[in-house]
Amino acid sequence: MPDVGVVEVGATWAPAAVAVVAGLAVAASALDGALAARSAGRPARTGLSAPLDETARLLRQRRRVTVAADSALWRAGGGGLLVAALLMVVVVPLGRFTLADLPVGIVWFNAMDVVVWAAVWLAGWGPNSAHALVAGYRFLALALAYELPLMFALTAPAVAAGSLRVGEVAASQDGWWYVVQMPVAFLVFCGGVVAFSVWGPFSVPAGADVAGGILTELSGVDRLLVQAGRYALMVAGSAFAVPLFLGGGAGPLMPGWAWVLVKTALLLAVLVALRRRLPALPPDRFAEVGWLVLLPLTLLQVLVVAVLAVGRG
Amino acid sequence: MGVTEVLAGRAVRRAHVLTVEVPGWWLARARVESAAVARGWQLATSPADADVLAVCGPPGDGLAAAVERVWQQLPGPRARVEVAGTDLGAAETALTRAAELLQTTGASDTPADHVPPGQHDGHDAGHGAGHDSAMHGDMAPAGIPLAEGADDRDGLEMDVLAVPLGPILPCWPGGLVLRCRLHGDVVAEATVDTLPAAAAPADLPAAATAVAVARRHDAAGQLLELAGWDDAATAARRLRDRLLAGEAPERVGTDAGRLHQRVSRSRTLRWSLTAEVRDRLLGMLDGTVEAGPAGAALEMLPGRVAGLDLAGVRLVVAGLALDLSSAAADA
């Protein structure tokens, strides 16, 4: 195994990783609050306290039970988003340090994003409510369209680096970040992150036309968990894009870990802002795009990357 | 000051308001939305999401009963306020009162979990058809009869869900109830019901043109919200609020044109909306479509929504921009 300089730190550092994810999630929520305030004609700074106020509101609000709810699965689904996000972050190296330097780190990330399928669907199934259930199935329809392109987008950097180890993929981008070499894979990956975070153009499962969808019947701390989970997933996805496409900790002056954080924050900000720009994509129509446009494009991307990799020998 | 008060203070800064639009009282609802957004409050999407229930106008008996059931579904701490006028002052007074109630309401307020089935107006559904309520012991878990089956539009046997849309549903015409029988999320058939107001607003503003233009933008905002484009919806509501605040339509014109341009240029919207709905939306923004009395549109509604999925139904209904003030009065 080549020495790529990734050091596995002990599990005692896990709380620190959680704190970093939480910090970035709060920042993302504050940014969204500020953008929302600005578009509503109020000063942007008045929206910055959105995460604090909303958390206080939801901590104060009571939990709620619906008739014949499948409570266990409902709660599992709601908490599952946050758990999946944290498990994704486990394999992301922060500069030289990582919690788990898995030989199949990329597959691990992919497995966790499939866990999100179950979590969102269960959040829709649990409350025994028509709107939530419809929303759960809407997510599955979206997922059927975005997941395969996302999987192949994840494959591209792995093929180029000849490794599924996230640290090695980051180290193999010597001065030539994969975002330049494989822009299609990068864009599809970002789309996938937005989709599994149920955000912006992919927020139909939480849409106004189904009264909030998976959120319809959620209140109090249960709602807080789901909302925090959505932001955390977006954080985890942005963080994972850094070693995969954005050169990992590479950058001048600052140490590697700082560059990873900066790059993550920048990508996260772009994804958060995307919500203002685009209307929602209906799942039935998006399926066509996913299978007929994105999937062939990503396959082509992997082909190009593979030919280049073979050419390099 | 204890932790509870600090938490309450923070929470009230971002209260979520669920509005109930009584037919004919759209203006009161628009004022509440405007006053809420000005405070940094949010518009709730469902009873579970709401801290404040703002009843805009005096509901008739049927609507009042629905309000009562939805009130039972608010998780609490919660506040219910009535908005008795269509001016901004009435809305602001009501929300100030709601803020006070929320701040002080604590453990004394009893929440209602376990709402009995069939009492979830607009947001939840009892399984099966309403008229077939015979209980069959284990066949009716939690008192809800199991769903019946029926052939869907493709000839597959599907469970049938009876789901009422409205009367209390955001971005939905006040007083309208669409009782749908769903196969999956596709509406197989629907019947229309209207719940009247107890009285019409007495203080309608005189500047009729500006109000009509504001009304169009209100309808466009609802349609954009349903299409999942919050930002454009917010822009439409801002235009509405400026018109209602007394700005001349000519002065608002430039920004209205900008919004029209932004919406008409959106390739996503052109692709995601049906041509009919998109034309209605653009018409609302440029003035070729007016919100009008429901009458004939209401009679044709069941035929128009049959075979559409829930998203399609919501968009079609919002595109009609129904005004039920007269229809509900006849009923």
Image (spheres, grey):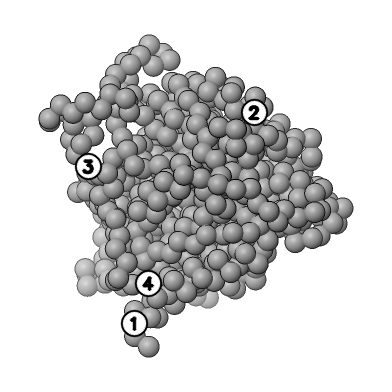
- The three-letter code of the residue at mark 2 reads Gly
Q: Chain of mark 1?
A: B
- The three-letter code of the residue at mark 4 reads Thr
For the residues beneath circles 4 and 1, the answer to whether they share a chain is yes
For the residues labelled 4 and 1, the Cα–Cα distance comes to 15 Å
Residue B262 in view, yes or no: no
Residue at 52%, 35% in the rendered image: B194
Camera-nearest label, 1 or 2: 2
Residue B185 in view, yes or no: yes
Return the residue at label 1.
Answer: B3
As drawn, the residue found furthest toward the left would be B137
**Residues at marks 4 and 3 touching, judged by CB atoms closer than 8 Å:** no
Residue at 65%, 67% in the rendered image: B89
Return the residue at label 2.
Answer: B295
For the residues beneath circles 1 and 2, the answer to whether they share a chain is yes
Q: Is residue A36 above or below residue A10?
A: above
Q: For numbered disc 1, what is the local secondary structure?
A: helix
Return the residue at label 3.
Answer: A68
